[in-house]
Image (tube, rainbow, N blue to C red):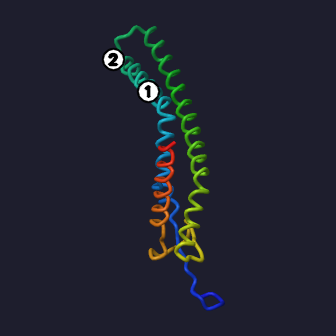
Amino acid sequence: MASASGQSLRVGYVDMKRVLDNAPQVVAGRQLLDEEFRARSEAIEVDEFRAKTLQDRLTQGDMTAEAARETEREMRELIRSINRRKEDLRDELSFRRTEEVQRLEDQINLAVQEIAQRNGYNLILSSPVVYAGPELDITDLILDQLEVEYAADQLELSTR
């Protein structure tokens, strides 16, 4: 492409899905979220095991009718509780992931701008786009830049 002044236009493309899946800042944020929500997730797993145990006891058929009704009632309540807690956990985790991505959005955009200026790009497009040839893809450059920034941030944190 050529601009009105006769100079060539340099265009690049960034696959934001790859950036959001692989940037070290995002991976670290994902790990923090996993740690933050691990106890609640494990508690749900314990209750799921307990519900399965109750189900197994019911299928054995060696209980009195009264005990079977009580066990079935307990199991239904437990399953309802598990489902509510799973939904709450999913919603909160989704909200926190969105928060983390938004928090990193500015840093990612700055990395894209820095790479564009350093490498003489006039225009950078990000996904989704209908088509971008592989020769336009600068996603690896962006990921490299984010890795450098992440390493610098980690070094700064470790010297505090």
Task: Please identify the quadrant where the N terminus is shown.
Answer: bottom right
Q: Nearer the viewer, residue 55 or 4?
A: 4
Q: Crowding at label 1, few (<14), some or many (≥20) Cα neighbours within 10 Å?
A: some
Image mark for residue 24: none
> What is the spatial separation of the Cα atoms under label 2 and label 1, in whole angstroms?
18 Å
Q: Nearer the viewer, residue 59 or 93?
A: 93
Q: Residue furthest bottom?
A: 6
- Disc 2 or disc 1, which is closer to the eye? 1
Name the residue that disc number 1 marks: 48
Residue 87 to residue 159: above or below? above
Residue in the image at 66% along x and 89% along y: 4
Where residue 10 sits, quadrant-wise, is: bottom right
Residue type indicated by callout 2: Gln
Image mark for residue 60: 2
Residue in the image at 57% along x and 47% along y: 100
Q: Nearer the viewer, residue 98 or 9?
A: 9
Measuring from the top left, give residue 106's x and y in whole percent. Answer: 61, 57
Residue 68 in sight here: yes
